[in-house]
Amino acid sequence: MNQIELFAPASVANVSCGFDVLGFCLDPIGDIMRISKTTTPGVIIGKIAGQDLPTDPLKNVASVAGLALLKEHSSEFGFQIDIDKKIKPGSGIGSSAASAAGAVFGINELLGAPYSKKELIRFAMEGEAIASGAAHADNLAPVLLGGFTLVRSNKILDVIKLPNPKELVATIIHPKIELKTLHSRAILKTTIPLNKAIEQWGNLGALVSALYTEDYELLSRSIQDKVIEPYRAMLIPKFEETRQAALNAGALGSGISGSGPSIFALSKGIQVAKKVGLEMEAIYKDLDLDYQLHLSKINTEGIKVLNRS
């Protein structure tokens, strides 16, 4: 095998109460990546379509992640990464994570798969750190493993794949403004009141329990963020109105996707999710601002191989 083409999906991180530890994988939204063997060792960035991204291997998250893998697993040949970038950087749905995860997945396959998907996360984290200023895996883990994931620890990487209630459907509205993770992290407080922390722990524990038991009512009560959203909400146009519109339309819960500006809602069943989307759209139609709306089942597979040659 000399080349692999794959679909690297978008993802939702934090899921309100799980800042930097919880995420889930989306299905129809993602990048197309082609990784090819080259005769020269190392990693180079080839063609990039869709977005203006750096081609310097030390500045592109995909090549940085790939180089991290090759630092541990040497290779006589090198790799070229071509990206059809369909996830806009700064959108809040894991653009950099898709690139980093796709790169290490593809290179690993061309090397004969010496690493498991879970082991690839730590290499991809080095690419993610370039984009966000912090090496975290809440987007990377669901992209590589699929479904919902919980990152117990980033320092000594410990990731748990969680169950996926079968009727869950995500609605995502993406206002077309860029909100870099690096900047949205900068406004956060470094300390939080104990009472808020206790509420957050309770919600996160309950949400994980709800995923295991498929308890949609418990899940609905748990999708609340007492720590992060109160600060980041001010950066997103009409956030509170959009979140409330989603809840009024029957969503189980709604919040900021990753660091924003995208807003997610989770619903039980596709029909409710469509209704939620219409109500979220109604808020944004009153603004002079372009947006995209996505409906997605939870992608339980993660990265998908499209072609091998």
Image (tube, helix red, strand yellow):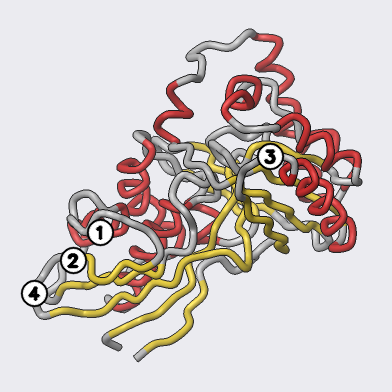
Q: Amino acid at mark 2?
A: Ile
Residue that carries the numbered disc 3 in the rendered image: 287
Q: Nearer the viewer, mark 2 or mark 3?
A: 3
Q: CA distance from mark 4 to mark 2?
A: 9 Å
Is 301 left, or right, of 183 in this rendering?
right
Q: Position of residue 151 (x, y in %)?
A: 53, 42
Q: Residue at x 23, y 70 (%)?
A: 46
Q: Position of residue 144 (x, y in %)?
A: 49, 61
Q: Nearer the viewer, mark 1 or mark 3?
A: 3
Q: Amino acid at mark 3?
A: Leu
Q: Residues within 10 Å of mark 1 (few under 14, many from 20)?
A: many
Is 37 left, or right, of 128 in this rendering?
left
Outermost residue on the bottom side: it is 309
Q: Are the residues tagged 4 and 2 within 8 Å (C-beta)?
A: yes
Quarter where residue 120 is shown? bottom left
- Badge 1 marks a residue whose secondary structure is helix
Q: Residue at x 76, y 37 (%)?
A: 242
Q: Position of residue 253 (x, y in %)?
A: 80, 40
Asked if residue 21 can be seen in this view, the reply is no
Closer-to-camera residue (204/172): 172
Q: Position of residue 171 (x, y in %)?
A: 73, 53
Q: Residues within 10 Å of mark 2 (few under 14, many from 20)?
A: many
Residue that carries the numbered disc 4 in the rendered image: 40
- Badge 3 marks a residue whose secondary structure is loop
Q: Are the residues tagged 1 and 3 within 8 Å (C-beta)?
A: no
Q: CA distance from mark 1 to mark 3?
A: 38 Å
Asked if residue 203 can be seen in this view, the reply is yes
- Badge 4 marks a residue whose secondary structure is loop
